Amino acid sequence: MNIGIDARMYGPRVGGGGLGRYVEQLIGELQTIDHQNRYVLFLKKENFEDCHLTNPHFEKRLANVHWYTLREQISLAELMDQEKLDFIHFPHWNVPLNLHTPFVVTIHDLIMLEQPRSAHATTRHPLVYMLKRAGYRVVLKRTLKKAKKIIAVSEYTKSSLLKHFPSLDPNKIDVIYEGVMNWEEDSQNQTKPPLPFQAPYFLYVGNAYPHKNLLSLLHAFSFFHQTHPEVHLVLAGREDIFYQRLKQEVEELDLPKDIVHFVMSPSDHELKNLYRSAALYFFPSLEEGFGLPPLEAMQAGVPVAASNTSSLPEILGEAALYFSPYDIEDMVKSMESVFTQKDLRAQLISRGYERVKKFSWNKMALAIMHGYANWIS
C-alpha cells in the first residue's frame, strides 16, 4: 500500500508535547517494523530535517502549511491528493474539507467541547474565537463522518466522541493507547540535576492552557510552601502567552521569587533530568484524552499525584495518588501525603514502574500498522 502521514506536527519542538511526540514515535516505530508498505511523510519546513529516514520505503514531502488555518483547508488537500496515495493517516482532527484521498484519523481529546470557554482561554477577539470554534466543529464533524477509521487514544476519548456525536458507529472507533518514553539513565548521560540548586522540587511538564489548571496548582503550592519552605516548584513547557500570564500570577502570590522555576523548551535530555530529579510529579489537569507526562514521570521513578478526572484514572490506574482538581485543599493534602510519607512514595514508585509496562510506542505502531491493512478496503 501507499500510505501518507500528515507529519507536520512531527516532534515536540514543532508540534507540541503530546501531539508532536505521538507523530515522532509513530513514524520512528513504523520505520523499524514495516518494510512492506510505502510511506509519504508530509512535513513542515521547521521539522523537515528533524525527521530522519532510516527505511528506504519512507519518503518526505514539504507541506509548509500551518495547522488551523484557512490555507490548510484550501491548499493542503491538493498537495496530498496529487500523491495518489491509498490513504492518509491524520494524527489530529484538522483534515482538509476538500480532500479526496481516503483517510484515517487519530482523535486525542475533545477538550474544546468538554471544557467551556473561559475568559482566559484565548488570546483572540471573542468574535474571532467564536468563528474558529464553529469552524472546529464543522471540520471535526466532517472528519469523523468521512474517516475510514477513527483511532481514539483512550476509552474516555471514545466515550466523549460518542457523547458529542451520537450518530457515530462505535465499531468505527478503535482504542489504541499511546506509548511512553524510556527515561532510564544510561551510562553516557551522568549529568547533574538541571537546576542550579540542591533542593527537592515538584514538577509539572506540559503546556499552560487553561484546562491544565496551573493557576490552581500555584495556589495549592503557595499553601504547601508555608509548611515546607525548602520545596521548589518547576514548570516546564513552551514559551507562549499562557506561560507569560502564569509568570505574572506567580509575582502576585505570596511566594519567594526564587521558589518557582520556569524551564522553557527543554530538550529531551533536559526533560529526562527534570523527571528523574523530581520529588513529585503533580498533574492538576481538568481534561486529558490520554495524559502522557505522568506516565513519563513513572518511567523515571517519580511518584505521581494526578486529577481524578477524564482519562487519568483509566491510564494511570492504581499507580497515582488522586485528588480533585477543583479542591485546593485536596491538592495541598496530596502534596503533603506524598512528600512526607515514605511508604506511600515507595508504593507509588513501585506501582508506576509496573503501570508503564502496559504502554509501548512499538505496541501502538504495530496495532496501527495491522489496522492499515484492514481499515482501507
Image (cartoon, grey):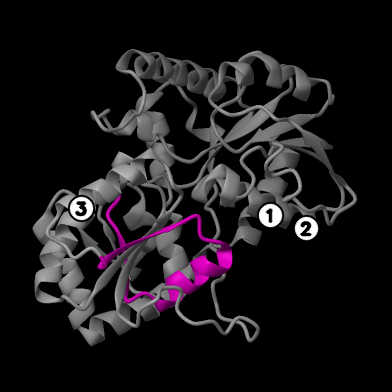
Q: Which residue is mark 2?
A: 33
Q: Amino acid at mark 3?
A: Glu
Residue 139 visible from this viewpoint:
yes
Is disc 2 placed on a helix, strand or loop? helix
Above or below 202: residue 312: above
Q: Which mark is residue 366?
A: 1
Closer to the camera in the image, 299 or 73: 73
- Mark 3 vs 1: CB contact within 8 A: no
Q: Residue at x 50, y 50 (%)?
A: 17
Tally the numbered discs: 3
Is disc 1 placed on a helix, strand or loop? helix
Residue 232 rendering spot, x and y as whole percentages: 27, 71
Q: Which residues are magenta?
A: 258-285
Q: Which residue is mark 3?
A: 251
Circle 3 crowding by C-alpha within 10 Å: few under 14, some 14–19, many from 20: few
Residue 279 rendering spot, x and y as whole percentages: 32, 76
Q: CA separation, marks 3 and 1?
A: 48 Å
